[in-house]
Image (cartoon, grey):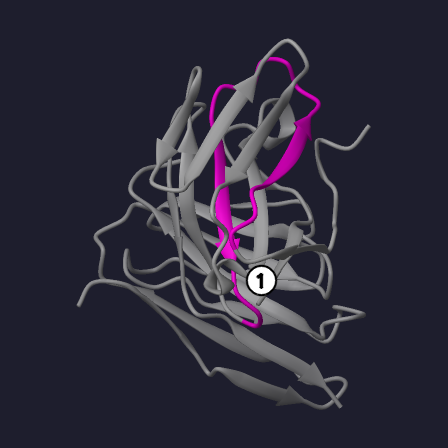
Amino acid sequence: RKEVEQDPGPFNVPEGATVAFNCTYSNSASQSFFWYRQDCRKEPKLLMSVYSSGNEDGRFTAQLNRASQYISLLIRDSKLSDSATYLCAVIGYGGSQGNLIFGKGTKLSVKP
Amino acid sequence: DGGITQSPKYLFRKEGQNVTLSCEQNLNHDAMYWYRQDPGQGLRLIYYSQIVNDFQKGDIAEGYSVSREKKESFPLTVTSAQKNPTAFYLCASSMRAPTISYNEQFFGPGTRLTVL
């Protein structure tokens, strides 16, 4: 099982829709999780950090499910400007001690 | 403005040539990182540095070299030993060395390297 896995999508949704992505991680000891947004041909930018039970920022909600070892990102009332690739990242353990391990990203396309 | 700069934005290289990618930060961050991203792929760690004059290999260090002579600068050299160097290279920095706790990384705009 890969350390961090994401559904690559694409998720094609209409404006105003609610969409959710999941990201699974393999190391049950992982403590810190992040969602980054990456626009086409640009650098990733931190969208949200996810601690303990989750985090909410406006239309965006991140949740952590330790029992099933996944984090989720929920976007409500999708905007055209939300179209991007969303990368999940987990702080690694063992050989990857302390470094961020990224998933391959989930592509979101919001249509008018 | 504080931030991370990378240059050049686009770089073309002939096979067999070494090239050096620049990364500078004025955030006073201790730790710096180099990642490689291929189309449709996540970021893979090449090298990282926790402090000046020290650096460690990441997951895909073969064919690359780095130096950290100044806190602000972490240049990456792509050598001719790197068999498939065409990729998007991203530099990042964080306030402190990698730990198991929260450690947000900030990214530069990236350098897109193409081997001709």
**What type is the residue that disc 1 sits on?**
Ser
| Quadrant in which the C terminus of chain B appears | bottom right
Q: How many marks?
A: 1
Give the answer, above or below, for where A11 lies relative to A109.
above
Where is residue A30? Give x, y as percent.
55, 19
A49 vs B64, nearest the viewer? A49
Seen in the image, is A36 located left or right of residue B46?
left
Q: Quadrant of the N terminus of chain B?
A: bottom left
Q: Quadrant of residue B35?
A: bottom right
Q: Is residue A97 above or below residue A104?
A: above
Image: magenta residue range: A16-41
- Depth check: give the residue in front, A13 or A87: A13
Nearest the viewer among A73 and B25 is A73
Residue A46 as seen in the image, left or right of residue B2: right
Residue at 34 percent across and 38 percent down: it is A57
Residue A85, position as x, y percentages in the image: 60, 56
Residue A101 in percent (x, y) is at 60, 38
Question: Height in image: B4 above or below B95?
Answer: below
Where on the picture, by quarter, is residue B95? top left
Element carrying mark 1: strand
Q: Residue at x 44, y 70 (%)?
A: B109
Residue sitting at x 74%, y 49%: A8
Tell me where residue A19 appears, x and y as whole percent: 60, 42
**Residue A74: in magenta span:** no
Closer to the camera in the image, B13 or B81: B13
Residue A40 in the magenta stretch? The answer is yes
Task: Tell me if B72 is positioned left or right of B82 in this view.
Answer: left
For the question of whether residue A104 can be seen, the reply is yes
Please indicate whether residue B103 sits to the left or right of residue A75 in the image. left
- Label 1 is found on which chain of the structure? B
In this figure, which residue is indicated by the disc labeled 1?
A: B65
Could you classify mark 1 by the number of other residues whose Cα lies within 10 Å: few (under 14), some (14-19), or many (20 or more)?
Answer: some
